[in-house]
């Protein structure tokens, strides 16, 4: 048996929007559309997450909400403030605390932590991690507690710009 980790970076944010702090920066239209497309793509491709751990930043929460709604995911979402400025070791610690009956966990958050975490878990260099892209890493472990650096196998990295038009709808 194995566990699956999905890392989803938030969609393209709107630098021109009015917002207080960086934490409050929203998605732009491109980010909303890409988030929906990625949600639909994952629903078709799989595996769907049993649990989503999401940064509380507005752009990450919006990405998560749009992707899950567009893909029809039926999953629990937990918002974690600490994921906003988390380091790769922090993400691994989160994984180690996941209940073992869950098979697939998604984390939604930010660069550069997401590419660094993917590389740390899989020993596979992730040179770019564009907005709204997603990585899948499989861990050959029976318990999440055994999630350690280098234990995973890099399976794929999906970019929104690589998706077929069928995944894009006008209303994300």
Image: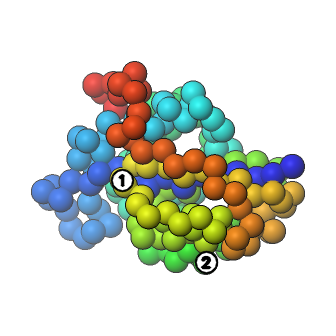
> Of all residues shown, which one is farthest toward the top?
166
Q: Which residue is pictured at 59% across the width and 64% down the height?
A: 124
Front-lying residue, 5 or 62: 5
Q: Where residue 138 sits in the image (x, y, percent)? A: 71, 53
Q: Which residue is pictured at 42% across the width and 58% down the height?
A: 129
Front-lying residue, 120 or 74: 120
Let me know if residue 60 appears in the view: no
Q: Where residue 115 sits in the image (x, y, percent)? A: 49, 65
Q: Which residue is pictured at 80% across the width and 68% down the height?
A: 145
37 vs 84: above or below: above
Label 1, secondary structure: give it: loop
60 vs 70: above or below: below
18 vs 48: above or below: below
Task: Say whether disc 1 or disc 2 marks the residue closer to the N-terminus.
Answer: 2
Q: How is the image coloured?
A: rainbow
In the rendered structure, the answer to whether residue 62 lies left or right of residue 7 reads left
Q: Where residue 163 sits in the image (x, y, percent)? A: 41, 33
Q: In the rendered image, which residue does mark 1 sit on?
A: 131
Q: In the rendered image, which residue does mark 2 sit on?
A: 89
Label 2, secondary structure: give it: helix
Front-lying residue, 164 or 77: 164
Front-lying residue, 172 or 44: 44
In the rendered structure, the answer to whether residue 121 lies left or right of residue 85 reads right
User: Which numbered marker is on residue 17?
Assistant: none
């Amino acid at each position: 048996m194995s566990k699956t980790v999905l890392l989803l970076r938030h969609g393209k944010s709107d630098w021109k929007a009015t917002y207080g702090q960086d934490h409050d920066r929203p998605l732009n239209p491109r980010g909303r559309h890409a988030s929906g497309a990625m949600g639909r793509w994952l629903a078709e491709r799989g595996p769907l997450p049993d649990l989503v751990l999401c940064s509380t930043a507005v752009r990450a929460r919006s990405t998560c909400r749009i992707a899950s709604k567009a893909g029809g995911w039926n999953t629990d979402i937990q918002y974690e403030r600490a994921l906003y400025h988390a380091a790769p070791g922090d993400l691994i610690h989160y994984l180690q605390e996941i209940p073992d009956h869950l098979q697939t966990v998604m984390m939604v958050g930010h660069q550069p932590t997401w590419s660094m975490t993917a590389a740390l878990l899989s020993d596979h260099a992730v040179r770019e991690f564009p907005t709204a892209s997603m990585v899948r890493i499989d861990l050959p472990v029976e318990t999440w507690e055994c999630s350690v650096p280098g234990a995973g196998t890099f399976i794929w990295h999906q970019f929104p710009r690589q998706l077929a038009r069928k995944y894009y709808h006008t209303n994300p």
